[in-house]
Image (spheres, rainbow, N blue to C red):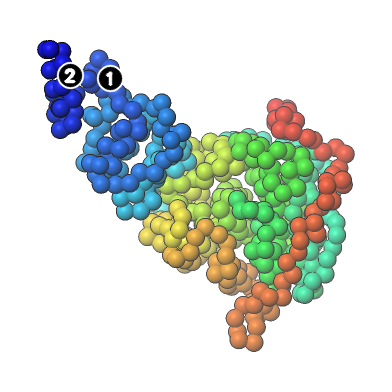
Amino acid sequence: MLKYIKISLISACILVGCSHAFAQTNNSDNDYKKPLKQVLTEIQNRFKVKIKYSEDMVKDRVVPYADWRYKATAAKTLASVLAPLDMKVNEEGPNAFKLKYYEYSRMTVEDGREKLAYLSSKYNDKLSWEKRKTDLRPCMLEALQLSPMPAKPASKPIITNKRVMDGYTVENIAIETLPGVYVCGSLYKPLKIKGKIPVMLCPDGHFGDGRYRADGQYRYAMLARMGAMAISYDLFAWGESLLQFKGEDHRRSLAMTVQALNSFRILDYILSLKETDANRVGITGASGGGSQTMLITALDNRIKLSVPVVMLSSYFSGGCPCESGQPVHLCGGGTNNDELAGMAAPRPQLVISDGGDWSANVPDTDLPYLKKIYGYYGKPDLVQNAHFPKEGHDYGKSKRLAMYDFVAQQFKLNIGAVKGTDGKVDESKVTIEKYPAQYVFGANGENLPKNAIHGFGELEKLFAK
């Protein structure tokens, strides 16, 4: 009878939230543990918020000292609760969160601002900033396993299938960047070349269809029609790189190394062309291509202009190993993409951002920081921002138009050549090609060089040497 009464009292206390019940069932003997799913439900009820998650993410996970981790807000409580589980949440809107596994490359917006303020405290003039860059660059190259730089293969680029279009030409190109490792792309040139002309490197980003997609072809062709060369190229283990490696190899740390090396080798080749104006060499890419744009500009002074698109953020360094898989962002006691973008100064830079991703805060957070850095050189106007608050993560037409204007102005291109009778830039004369036309090595890779390596293990052996 007494046993029955005791159980009933405990049950009653649980129903009304009596602290006595917890004394009976949850205490320091079991580290105040609670199932994660139960804790998330309690947080939702207490703070009137919504937390999205899959059942697999919470299954069998337990939070130690759960009830002791409550803070003044839902966000701070979730950070405290999830920290021992290597998990976190992303804020998706007012009172809305999404459970995530720990992301080493992503902080909160507020943490990003604090990090930016901390970095800014390290320098206050051109001299101290140049010292910071001097410290960062060799560390970054070493982090990429590119110090010393691997020997350059003696082979010549493979160029195939020249096509003549309206105001421009296209050739497919492959460059051997390491023995048996090839990066493929497309080289767009003006139909008529007179004297030295500018070049824009166009590293691909994480978009479906890779460098073959229509918005990329518009961009490359329009630059050529305005009087510049443009060279697009694959991400590692994307596009024709899949002839040598598996798609999952893209999510290995060496992807970041190979992609950086690809850009350096392409830059070497472009600068060897007699028509290239070495004083007008730029780079632009979106998403993962934006990460490459900032990284290569920071490391190579041969780049004279940069346009990183939908990637600049003080709190996000890129979620793919090809962007943050090597410890580049740990150099100098810790850095971020804002500092990398600042290393472009005083070279012209247009940051393109939008309201639908991590670049949403560029106008009020990242741009003022960059203006400060460019101000050390007396050239704050050489860094600009085109922000599209109602747009999302892409290199869409409005973003391309902003890039065309900026590059045309800085590199003295003939933007009038791509305008219609209404005075607006017109992309309709660009031919959008099917994938096979852009392949270097044939529809089934039948023309892949005999020395081409196959498999990630072979790539690791190259670096082991």
The residue at 62%/77% (across/down) is: 425
Tell which residue pokes out farthest to the front in this image.
1
Q: Which residue position is annotated with label 1?
A: 31
In this view, the residue in front, 20 or 146, is 20
Secondary structure type for disc 1: loop
Callout 1, which amino acid? Asp
Callout 2, which amino acid? Ile
Question: On screen, 420 above or below 86?
Answer: below
Q: Which residue position is annotated with label 2?
A: 7
- Please say if the residues under marks 2 and 1 sit with CB atoms less than 8 Å apart: no
Tag shown at residue 104: none
> Residue 182 location, x and y as percent?
77, 44
Q: Is residue 25 left or right of residue 294?
A: left
The residue at 22%/20% (across/down) is: 25
> Residue 394 location, x and y as percent?
55, 59
Residue 201 seen by the camera: no
Quarter location, residue 77: top left
The residue at 30%/50% (across/down) is: 95
Q: Disc 2 vs disc 1: which is toward the camera?
A: 2
Where is the C terminus found, in terms of image quarters?
top right
